[in-house]
Image (spheres, rainbow, N blue to C red):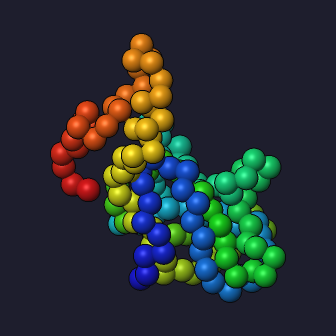
Amino acid sequence: MAVVATVGDDGGALVSLPDTWPITGPYRVRLLDARLQENPSDPAGVAYQCNAGRLDKAIDCYTDIDKVALVVALPVCPTGTYTLEITHGVGFATTFATTDEIKVQRRTRRPSAWSQRSGFPSLYKTGPRDLRAEQIHRGAL
């Protein structure tokens, strides 16, 4: 299997899935964890799918005009490696076979975020303003 993207666990990352796609869409993309169960899901058990990353398309994802790249936006999810389940067709009953994987790591802190936070008065609770003020995460990445 090929890792097509390594992203942060805070969601919203756009991932391009290169392939020769049979139609322009719509496609539905779900993340499956190592147990091949849909992930992530909220405490009520409702699963979240990837979305199109476009305001007007919701969870219906489309390829580019040449049908060589499917772009999806990832949901917030726990760290780990996920396989993709891509469906299309009437009732989204046709599953597109893929060996692609998405690796989700703990999100990184960026100097640009600290810089922006530093521009606000200290009265505002903007969070850490430099690396030394960041809380260190312990545990598996």
Residue 92, given in percent of the width and then of the height, sits at 71, 66
Residue furthest left in the image: 138
Compared across the picture, whether 88 is left or right of 138 comes to right
Is residue 6 or residue 101 the one in the foreground? 6
Q: In which quarter of the image is the N terminus?
A: bottom left
Q: Residue placed at 42% from the left, 66% from the top?
A: 6
Is residue 67 or residue 47 the one in the foreground? 67
Is residue 18 or residue 95 the one in the foreground? 18
Q: Residue placed at 50% from the left, 62% from the top?
A: 31
Compared across the picture, whether 78 is left or right of 69 comes to left
Q: Which quadrant of the figure has residue 61?
A: bottom right
Q: Quadrant of the C terminus?
A: bottom left
Q: Is residue 137 above or below residue 1?
A: above
**Residue 93 is at least partly visible in this image:** no
**Residue 7 is at least partly visible in this image:** yes
Q: Is residue 124 above or below residue 98?
A: above
Residue 112, given in percent of the width and then of the height, sits at 45, 45
Residue 99, given in percent of the width and then of the height, sits at 48, 81
Q: What count of labels does the image hold?
A: 0
Q: Residue placed at 47% from the left, 28% from the top?
A: 119
Q: Residue placed at 47% from the left, 58% from the top?
A: 38
Residue 37, given in percent of the width and then of the height, sits at 43, 60
Q: Is residue 24 above or below residue 116?
A: below
Residue furthest top in the image: 123
Q: Is residue 10 above or below residue 38?
A: above
